[in-house]
Image (tube, rainbow, N blue to C red):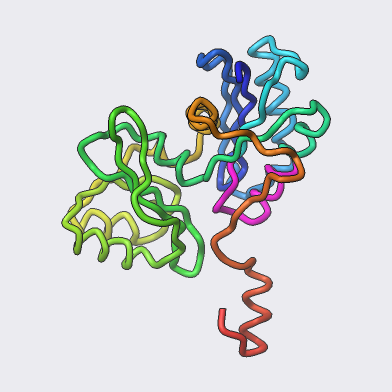
Amino acid sequence: MNTILAMDTSGASSSAAVLRGGNLLAETTAANPRKQHCEGLMPMLDTCLNMAQIQPRDIDVIACTSGPGSFTGIRIGAAAAKGLAHALNIGIAAVPTLDALAYNVLDASLRIVPVMDARRGQVYTAAYVWEGGLLRRVGEYECVLLAQVLSGLGESGAVAVFTGDGVGVPDNAAAILAAGHTIAPANTRYVRASSVAYLALHRLAGGHEPAGYNDFTPFYLRKPQAQRELEEKQGVPT
């Protein structure tokens, strides 16, 4: 897979990038705190293609974050990826959002813990380590309270570097530092499409086949807020 068009709309930023032959040709990332990705994603993709001097017909695969994250944002990214893949008759390389966040942080000495704000005091999270120049996830993807993340790290004795927009939630940074961990620089806390592209490249090189546009399925880790609120009113455990 020579040319990859990558995108992310899973959180509070939008990002697009073009990777060709392992070289990053173009990337653009913009803060999008209101998560109105539908307004800016396609122009952003077009800008990257123009910057890279790449025509849509030159794209070999679409790389897209598959979740977790904002339900609306994930759906917008998935719809764009599916539409482009269908139109161009190419596949989609799914990249978990937390993997892409962790990929931003190159620190082989610490465990890397991305945390995305999941509301209600919870975060989407996982833990990673760098081994032999490759990023490896340790443990499962979770939606839990930050206190549970810190407790688990304390029990294991691991020291971690945290990244992601969950760091900016009130009191989270103070709790992380008080527990003896560190926080990555602000420029690493949002998903970059270049990270999505490189992770897709590694997966494809490792034998993972891109999914057809009908087979690309996001994952959310929990039910949408509207469904949870309805179930709570009905007394259904959520």
Q: Nearer the viewer, residue 210 or 194?
A: 210
Q: Residue at x 71, y 45 (%)?
A: 215
Q: Which quarter of the rendering shows the N terminus?
A: top right
Work out whether 26 lies above or below 129: above
- Farthest right residue? 87
- Left or right of 83? Residue 182 is left
Give the extent of the magenta segment. Answer: 65-79
- Farthest front residue? 207
Type of secondary structure dominating the magenta stretch: helix
Q: Is residue 10 magenta?
A: no
Q: Nearer the viewer, residue 157 or 93?
A: 93
- Left or right of 137? Residue 200 is right
Q: Residue at x 38, y 38 (%)?
A: 186
Q: Residue at x 39, y 48 (%)?
A: 114
Give percent across and percent down for residue 200: 54, 31
Give percent across and percent down for residue 40: 71, 36
Work out whether 185 lies above or below 138: above
Residue 134 is drawn in which quadrant?
top left
Residue 7 appears in the figure: no
Residue 58 is drawn in which quadrant?
top right
Q: Which quarter of the rendering shows the C terminus?
A: bottom right
Callout count: 0
Give percent across and percent down for residue 126: 39, 53
Q: Is residue 68 magenta?
A: yes
- Left or right of 175? Residue 41 is right
Q: Residue at x 73, y 23 (%)?
A: 46
Give percent across and percent down for residue 171: 34, 61
Residue 51 appears in the figure: yes
Q: Nearer the viewer, residue 133 or 238?
A: 133
- Farthest top residue? 53
